[in-house]
Amino acid sequence: MNSLKTSVLLAVLTGLLMAIGNMFGGSSGMMIMLVFSLVMNFASYWYSDKIVLSMYGAREVGVAQAPDLIRLVSNLAQKAKMPMPKVYIVETDAPNAFATGRNPENGVVAVTTGIMRVLSYEELEGVVAHELAHIKNRDTLISTVVATLAGVITMIANIAQWAAIFGGGRSDDEDNGGMLELVFTIVLAPLAATLIQLGISRTREYLADETGGLLSNPLALASALKKIEYYAKHAVMPEAKPATSHMFIINPFSGAGGWMVSLFSTHPRTEERIEKLEALAKKMR
């Protein structure tokens, strides 16, 4: 079901981009937007892992530096029948974790020093299983494609906005005829793209919880989510960047926001994730 939701939302996002291209340049406009997005996808897909690891000052570790962590990741990777990913540690007291890598053969799991202190071994196992699930499900590729498509739509909206401000010289008939298209491009399309992007992000988190729960203990993962969110709500991770918040198992900015947080959140509500994991545990028993 989660995979189907992702496919539907991704198709809608692609259709939205092509519709804007068609609106401004006909069939040639659609092709230009499609080719442009593919080029951007390729660049983001190939280099995103190096960029994010460098952004957080992550250091790669092996058996000599973190024997227990390496053994835990190795055992789960074998259980999931996937290649052993590289393992990185981020020096910060905030407990959190993320995965990156353009495919399972180049997968990376990164955990913070804080998460290794706060969680029990079984809870950490659940978190690592969740991150391996992201790699196994190729979520880095999916999130890159989605972010690029949404970014192109927003960029077109900005261009259209500046063109409308400095364009001038149009007749009243032209202004009236193009007003709806302008409102759609500048306001509605970027908003729709953002909501679709966030919807896909939340769907992939549910899927990673389910896959990770099946690889480990879903109740331990649920307990880990509760602990990580507690720390995220009481102290924002100082190193966190909004552009990469969707990558973490719990949004490091969970403590910020108001009544519209759930609508514009990169992650589902933790309470709902815990309920699904508890239901999965019952099903497994």
Image (spheres, helix red, strand yellow):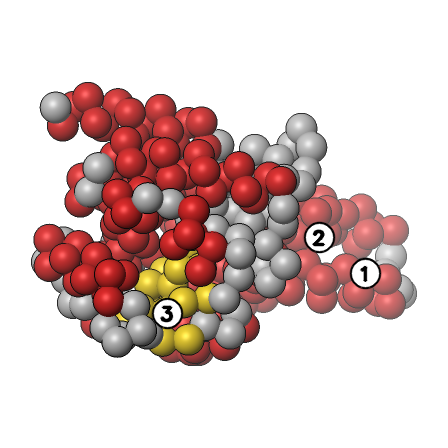
Q: Percent position (x, y) of residue 7?
A: 33, 46
Left or right: residue 99 versus residue 254 is left
Q: Is residue 135 visible?
A: yes
Residue with the mark numbered 3: 88
Left or right: where does residue 61 sit relative to residue 245?
A: left
Q: Are marks 1 and 2 in contact (CB under 8 Å)?
A: yes
Q: Earlier in the sequence, mark 3 or mark 2?
A: 3
* Mark 1 lies on residue: 164
Closer to the N terminus: mark 3 or mark 1? 3
Look at label 1 and name its amino acid. Answer: Ala
Q: Nearer the viewer, residue 145 or 179?
A: 145
Q: Secondary structure at mark 2?
A: helix
Residue type marked 3? Tyr
Quarter-of-image position of residue 214: top left
Q: Which residue is mark 2?
A: 186
SS at mark 3? strand
Using the image, tell me which numbered label, if any, was put on residue 102: none
